[in-house]
Image (spheres, rainbow, N blue to C red):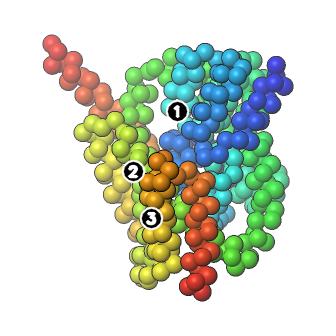
Amino acid sequence: MIYLSLFLEFFKIGLFSFGGAFGMLPLIEEVVVSHRWLSSNDFYSFVGICESTPGPIAVNIATYVGSIQGGFLGSIVATLGVILPSFILILLIASVLKKFIENRFVKYFLQGVEPVIIALILSTGIFLLMNEVGIEMKHVHFEKASFMILMILLGCSMIYKRVFKRKISSITLILLSSIIGIIVCSILHI
Amino acid sequence: MLFHLWITFLKIGLFTFGGGYAMIAQIKEHILEKKGWLTEEEFIEIIAIAESTPGPLAINLATFVGYKKRGFLGSLVATLGVVIPSLVIIFLLSLFLSSIMENRYVQYAFIGIQCGVCYLIIKTGFSMVYHMKKSKYRIIILMIALLSALIFKITSIDFSSIFFILIGGILGIVFSSLSSYFKKEDQK
């Protein structure tokens, strides 16, 4: 029953996702890839799309995965799954559990969760970087194109910071990286 | 009022690019400054709660503001408002994304985009390390979690992030309780 498993898996994601958009990525990737709903490559491509479309990343991924696995109904079910835990929890806190958030142990719990979330984000990023440039467990093969794109991107964002005196926004960075991707891959003829 | 709430959050959902933190600015502009639906104090309280509960920040904020204004119905309307734009846009996109992806140049663009996402994730991670309130035990948790998460990934051992989060939370309770206990002892 695809609808039920979409709902339950995205409910789980909604319930255990702390730490902003990127804090959720490790868990979402885990769920989506282990069910073979998306390949790891497609997943990160779609995250790139999410950076340039409005709305929370978790909701966007839920809608997308739901739609390709179960059509329109699937997208509704998955989206409901990912927002319901927040909805219920916030309602409880706003109505009866006002003191919950001030509870000492809730604070302590969150103090321990924060470094773990950061570690998960960093490990996801580093592992992704290793895959991009071709370092894998079984065989190492140098990915020229990705390596060049990353270097150019790094250079561009440093120059941008110098020239405009502010950080490059994620949307601009994603647009820029798509253009660099087209140029570098066309030159290298992959 | 309900319809007004819905339209306002629909607008916020439609124009919030770049995740939850961009949304905080949008809410501040629309709900506080233009509409005066919340006071500065309520706003700060709402953000603190939204950040310490799981789930997308945008959903948490919408639910809370909706509830404050019009109870359960208000929260339902505000949450639906903020979700509908993404739902419609992404659903339409999903219908023809796979056919666009067959184009060679689109594939090239996505090789670039994957690198861009990788860059953004690492950058976010490091800036979170930089902004984290540091204490000895939190740095140790960070290092151990980072190392073990990487090893599990490379050797493709299944270990759900949920366990990482729960273990981190339990360690947080243990160490914070211990350190506040010893502080009290010192004061005596």
Q: Position of residue A189 (x, y in %)?
A: 60, 86
Q: Which residue is mark 2?
A: B126
The tally of labels here is 3
Q: Position of residue B28 (x, y in %)?
A: 62, 27
CA distance separating discs 3 and 2? 18 Å
Q: Which mark is residue B51?
A: 1
Q: Position of residue A69 (x, y in %)?
A: 75, 61
Nearest to viewer (mark 2 / mark 1): 2
Q: Residues within 10 Å of mark 2 (few under 14, many from 20)?
A: some
Q: Is B173 displayed left or right of A63 in the figure?
A: left
Secondary element type, mark 2: helix
Q: Chain of mark 3?
A: A
Q: Residue at 50% across / 50% down in the picture?
A: A164
Type of the residue with mark 1: Glu
Type of the residue with mark 3: Gly
**Which quarter of the figure has residue B56?**
top right
Frontmost residue, A35 versus A189: A189
Q: Residue at 69% across / 17% down in the picture?
A: B37
Q: Which residue is mark 3?
A: A155
Type of the residue with mark 2: Phe
Secondary element type, mark 3: helix
| Picture quarter with the C terminus of chain A | bottom right
Residue A56 appears in the rendering: yes
Q: Which of the two discs, 2 and 1, labels the residue nearer the N terminus? A: 1
Q: Is B145 displayed left or right of B76 in the figure?
A: left
CA distance separating discs 1 and 3? 33 Å
